[in-house]
Amino acid sequence: MLILSHRGIEYRPNSLKALNKALTCGFSIETDLRVSKDGKIVIIHDKNLKDNFGIDVNVNELNYKSITNTNSEFVDLIPEFENFIKISVGSLHSKQVIALHIKDHDNTDLIFKTCEVIIKYKLEERVFIFDILLEYVKKVKNYYPKCKIGISVGEKNYSPTIYTVDDIKQYVQFIDIIWADEWKDGLYKKDFFWYCEGIKKDVYVVSPELHKSEEHPFAHKPEMLWKNVSHFIFNGICTDFPEEARNFFESNVKNLKFHDQSNFV
């Protein structure tokens, strides 16, 4: 089972240093993509730079080349996606994956350009996109059949790109990955995992500390949820505490059922 470090470790989240540190430590990673005004795919979570960087500008209004020329620190703090791939591709080992959260979910240009980078570096088996609109899935799959697409599934429709199990049923043939995203309670049940196993989709579970603002009941004690889900079959877990998760699941591996226990990192 894979441990996906949420936006990297140690350094500023989503920075080149944080992402590469996580990969160096043997973790897989989850990170976020948006597109700048000048068409650059950049790694950043928030739509606006004010809270994290003190600049009141939306990413889609940002001239990336201009800001990096003005302050070279932004090359690390807001990495260009393809530059990150160039740096990291040689260090990826055979069991690591990179999950790309498409934050501009209604921007097909971002989705297509991201797929083209994945194909350019022959990473179709190691890198996948997720959190796109269901209505785009078939189109993207037709253009880029080898690229893996993940759909966020929650217990409710908490956002335009979080779907229920019933919502995805007519799109199953175009989906490769279920990004299991329980915000509050009720998704991580045996029927859900059995359904995913039945349709033969890879499953990545979101750890509850990622939903502190939604007051997930295990947000402050994620190991309780890890224990609950450890009885089910899934491929990996995305967490802010990758070291703790690795220690937990490795210590419990003999009692668990996973798709491939050799996938521990």
Image (cartoon, rainbow, N blue to C red):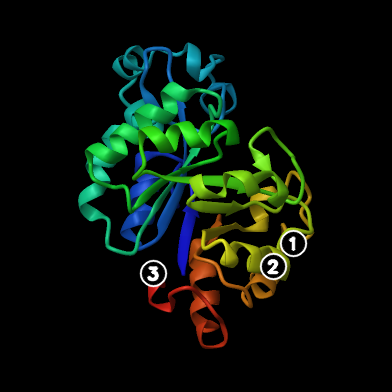
Q: Kindly tell me whether residue 121 is visible in this rendering.
A: yes
What label sits on residue 49 in the rendered view?
none
Residue 217 locus on image (x, y percent):
79, 59
When asked about the image quadrant of residue 214, the answer is top right
Residue 255 locus on image (x, y percent):
57, 87
Helix, strand or loop under label 3? loop
**Residue at (34%, 53%) from the top-left corner?**
126
Q: CA distance from mark 3 to mark 1?
A: 24 Å
Q: Is the Cβ of the residue at disc 3 closer than 8 Å to that at disc 1?
A: no
Q: Is the Cβ of the residue at disc 3 closer than 8 Å to that at disc 2?
A: no
Residue 142 locus on image (x, y percent):
40, 35
Of the numbered discs 3 and 1, the one sitting upstream in the chain is 1
**Residue at (43%, 26%) from the top-left corner?**
110
Amino acid carrying mark 3 in the image: Val
Quarter of the image that includes the C terminus: bottom left
Amino acid carrying mark 2 in the image: Leu
When asked about the image quadrant of residue 196, the answer is bottom right
Q: Most extreme residue toward the bottom, as rendered?
A: 254
**Residue at (74%, 40%) from the top-left corner?**
157
Residue neighbourhood size for the residue with mark 2, other residues' Cα within 10 Å, grouped as few (<14), some (14–19), many (≥20): some
Q: Is the Cβ of the residue at disc 2 closer than 8 Å to that at disc 1?
A: yes
Residue 264 locus on image (x, y percent):
41, 72
The residue wearing badge 1 is 218
The residue wearing badge 3 is 265
The residue wearing badge 2 is 225
Q: Is residue 64 left or right of residue 92?
A: right
Q: CA distance from mark 3 to mark 2?
A: 20 Å
